[in-house]
Image (cartoon, rainbow, N blue to C red):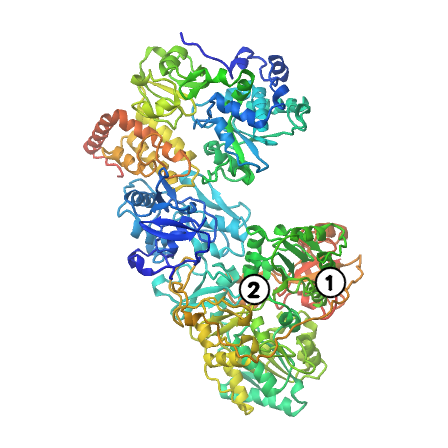
Amino acid sequence: MTQETRIVSKFLRDHPGDSWTIEAALANGTYATLDTLFDRAPEDIIQQVADSGLRGRGGAGFGTGQKWSFLPKDVFPRYLAVNGDEGEPSTFKDHMLVEGDPHQLIEGIVITSYAIQAHHAFVYLRGEFALGAERLGQALADAYARGFVGKNVKGSGYDLEIVLHRGAGCYIAGDETGLLSSLEGERAMPRIKPPFPAVQGVYAAPTIVNNIETLSTVPHILRNGAEWYAAMGVNRSKGTRLFSVSGHVERPGNYEVELGITFRDLIVGLAGGVRDGKKLGFFIPGGASSPWLLEEHLDAPLDMDYVQSELSATTMLGSGAVMVYDETVDPLLVAWRIAKFFAHESCGKCTPCREGSGWLEKVLYRMLHGYGRPEDLDLMLGFGNNLAPGLGWPPGMTTICQLGPSTMSPVVSLNRFWRDEIIERMTRDAERRDALTVKAAV
Amino acid sequence: MTSTTPDAVPMSQWPSDYEYVIPVAPGPDVVTVTIDGNAVEVPRGELLIKAAQQHGTYIPRFCWHERMKPVGMCRMCLVEIEGMRGLQISCATPVADGMVVRTQSDVVKKAQDGVLEFLLINHPLDCPVCDRGGECPLQDQTLAFGPGESRFVEEKRHYEKPIAISDLVLLDRERCIQCGRCTRFAAEIAGDPLIDFGGRGGSTEVITYPDEKFSSYFSGNTVQICPVGALTAAAYRFRARPWDLETVETSCQTCAVGCRGALDSTSNRIVRLLGVDSEPVNQGWLCDKGRYGYEWVHSPDRVRAPRVRIAGDSGEASWPEALDAAAAGLRRALDGRGPTSIGVLGGARGTNEDAFLWARLAKEVLGTDNVDAQLGDGLPAEVVLGLPRAVISDLDRARGIVLLGPDLKEELPVLHLRVRRAAVELGVPLVEIAPRATGLTREAAAVLRHAPGEAAAIGQAFARALAGDGTASGDGQIERAVAALDGREGDLVVVLGRQSLAESADSVVAAAAALAQVPGVKFLSALRRGNVHGALDMGLAPGFAPGRVAVDGPPGLDAAGILAATAAGDIDTLVLLGTDLLCDFPDRALVRRAFDEVRFVVAVGAFASDVADRADVFLPTSVWGEKNGSTTNLEGRVMRLARLVTPEGTAMEDWRIASELALRFGTDFGLETVEAVQDEIARVAPAYAGVDATLLARARDGVVVPVAAHPGEIVLQPAPGVSAGVSWEPIRPTPVVEPDADDAAPPEVPADQPDLYRWDRAATAPVAVPPDAYSLRLVVARTLYDTGRTVSSSPSLSSLATGPVLVVHPSDLSRLGVAAVGDTVRVTSARGSVEVAVRTDTAVAPGTCFMPFAQGAGEPAPNDLVAVGDAVTELRVESTR
């Protein structure tokens, strides 16, 4: 039986009744790292986090310590922006962390802000997280009252203001530059990079954007050492990660596991396998943006680089959201539903995404409702190739951010695994329409 | 070396904005970039799209615009760069040494094809009924780079079309390709962020705020830069097809900035004015008043034949009859009380040629120096002509800008954009000296607010502080201003104009005199009327001969003096050059007294008016768009004006009328063409030495006079008389060609030039008028939309006039307790009393009030309250209930 390896989720699992309160957090030893934090040089902390091999948990998987080291020297002020706009469909790990253990997050923010020498941190929290906002707000108030945040943190002379900002319901605010635009009061439209946020982020100042789970991990690395963290995991995927397993499984939920176990361990071992004795149809390994996998891929390890380059069907671990569909699910329906999501959430900035995502949704809708044509799959791949050149993973890009090419993942997956079936089905539909002389508007 | 040669690409592939290039000479800091196999040298840091264009490679684009920051939305300008993953947008990629770029590889072509297919899936393709059809970047680029057929079989998105987003601009959301040029222009360039994107994904659309229209003074620019027909102009919609247009390049004459524009006509009617991107002048922009103000040219109110009053009745006459009658009237004055009994007013709306010959007629033939092109609303000619002068582009690199004058947004809108850009984008500190908030207050590094009529004291204190003699102002703003300027290099540019018409010019003049002592100071005149600077240069001012030279002896009377002398009976004959004094002069009572006394009036102008009805002889003139000539803008730049349509009726050029009248006094100027007059000006007017017809015809952006003070700034076109090509993007008539060695030689200026006039008046003591606690001190100034001829005779603009109103600070309204917002109040000054509606605005300082000038001839007007020469005007406000 596979076991979880709980680090960031340990305290909130162990104290489900009061883990978000300051009293419970203090009893647990949260904030203890601040006792010695300010005796250390900021560069020292950046080095330690770099040595731990921690990679961003938002989806892109960029080395956290490496990102921090990109800050231009001697340019101040700098800011930390905490990406809590967890918007990737079926991802709910940050949701749990911010509701269950806000003090762990605040501790991580203080450490990170000190390491990057920022005196302002902004927590951009998804608007729908009402309870999370309430608990984080209370936690911040308590942390301020106890001197963990604010002027002269713990008597160190270091000042830190943490601002909680709630989003207004927009997927693309989860992109780091989209988040910064939204934070500034603009539409959450991603910006051209370069300049990267580390050079010119919020208010045109150097800014580090980190995910909630990433920052929640940081105190544990300081507490236990980089070697301890780096000893867990596999290859370049170090430590543990939270995976949100949802869909047709017996026990959906968040599971914190050491990287390197397999999808089978996660889906069957921990989540109990496909429910009601049905067979697995397919699963989406890393959020709605990622290309899909089948039963035959279950033994692939949870290794960010492996799934992206060595797996036969290249995909990504992304945000760690694993969606499981049983054998009864029509892949075309799922593809359309995801396309509809992306068409709705495209910010409208880049032409290929703004127009292509809507086009894709319209074609899939038509196909799903019996008005498809045999050539529609190739049509989607054809114009999709102008949105995600090459249609591989990671995709080529004609847009500023990843949303555009991500819209093609469901279609790429349909083509990979069900091409013949779909063309056959569309042919049948066309013949049926002909027989009924009910011609589609097409 | 040439910048762009149109032969580089087949003509069929020219996109609309192909020709437009700002030349950048390779400086010392250049890098070598290989574009499609050609190694070229470009300045380090230049954007790739621009660098490629300068070397003949056009990269297609929709969202990128030369004058705005890149945003990377449309994805049309994707190129392949060796060593970089995927495709890069060339609009946001700066060049780097050794960069190897491919703009026409298969991958790039596929991407361009793909972007155009995406853009067209929801585009309605209603080109046959679209204003833009025929000059549309989307059409052109689809033809050059796009797919032949669409694979899209779904239903396109639909919107109600069009919707009016302002009184002047309509939006068709179906045609919109969401490039964000308009929204970025509004926020970035105009500073009026009144439009933005709403919705998202395929539903992204340009929106206004729910309760606020896109009422920017610059809204028309969005129509011009829109790369499709999504934004259309109410004034131009369905008026013409691009291939039917005739075009000339000219200068707008609505205000004294003289923005370069391409004027279009069809069937002998002017239908459109587009901004031409002239780097030193307007950088492609126009204000809406200038853009749509052409409509007055064809107004039914134009006078189309001469009129002569015989026995009290005015009737049409032939030109010889009318000219004889005018000459006879002037002859009677000369024979009666002599030359000084003649006054000549106006002339600031004509060409330099008009002003030159009218000045000669008045001063040389008739012998009167009672001549003034300004109408009591400007500054003394000796101040305008005699201070060290700045040019507009000096603002970009100034040590600082001091605004000592009107609200530029209202009076000189495109200069406002330039100052705003300097302050916002280029980091030039702006110091505002004004009695009320202006359109630039938000951008100012320091705001020296003062009571109306008391600019002198604060201006002098600021000048002392700059000299290191610190006197603290109460609010620390002088210290802020000095600190902002501290350590900066360059000239201090003072934008100098009249702050308010409710006070004499003395206070502003005294402040200017103090600032004139600051080392490295230059002045940019903020006088308003189209060619007022040309008129003053040509001698339509007391005490001056053509070419900025003072005449010996005591000067004649200025406008206020002429009217006072007329009222007193010392002047009995007036010549009015295109003025409506009851509307334009700040003191209406004085005008009425003068007209009660005057014996003989010759009106030379285009429109009938109350004053013109009083005229004994009315001589109709041809106007802007109907005649060739030259104009001088506020920086002293002489630019060509071009004729596009035939004059209404038998209207004649002003200068020809002057010549004809001179003949009747036995003087033959011997000048039969505009070019001959220009050559004559170049010969006899010292400041204009060398600026002859040949040079004017070839100088692309005009010539700043005197040429000796501005060497090397003249860019010549390859051949004289080239008209603007029809092109929609910021327009340039022809590719820029570096002048030959012969051309590069500066125009010849005779050695024995008289000295130009310099004004060196000692600083005067500040005027301080004790405040009256029961009154509000009045500020009177123009708003962009008034009831002057340009607006009232242009149907698109006429409804936009502010209307008569009294604006007070909210605290004053509650303190006085006499009225609520919208009520009518009675306001009384020492000179008069009117009833007017009141509203509140925090832009007006407490203790002061504001009335817009020229808001209708029959309406309650501030010029019923103001007497010329009064230091300030105090108003008592009473209830009418």
**Location of residue A343 by image quarter:** top left
Q: Mark 1 points at which residue?
A: B456
Q: For numbered disc 2, what is the local secondary structure?
A: loop
- Disc 2 and disc 1 in contact, CB within 8 angstroms: no
Q: For numbered disc 1, what is the local secondary structure?
A: helix
Q: Residues within 10 Å of mark 1 (few under 14, many from 20)?
A: many
Judging depth in this view, the residue of B471 and A161 nearest the camera is B471
Residue lying furthest top:
A1
Judging depth in this view, the residue of B501 and B323 nearest the camera is B501
Judging depth in this view, the residue of A404 and A324 nearest the camera is A404
Say if B786 sits above or below B103 in the image. below
Judging depth in this view, the residue of A302 and A250 nearest the camera is A302
Residue B765, position as x, y percentages in the image? 77, 66
Type of amino acid at the residue the image marks with label 1 = Ala
Q: Mark 2 points at which residue?
A: B391
The residue that appears at 60% across and 24% down in the rendered structure is A40
Residue B109, position as x, y percentages in the image? 30, 45
Label 2 lies in what chain? B
Whole-number angstrom distance, CA of label 2 to CA of label 1? 24 Å
Label 1 lies in what chain? B
Q: Which mark is residue B208?
A: none
- From where the camera sits, is residue B169 visible? no
Residue B776, position as x, y percentages in the image? 75, 58
The residue that appears at 53% across and 26% down in the rendered structure is A46
Type of amino acid at the residue the image marks with label 2 = Val
Which quadrant of the rendered structure holds the C terminus of chain B? bottom right
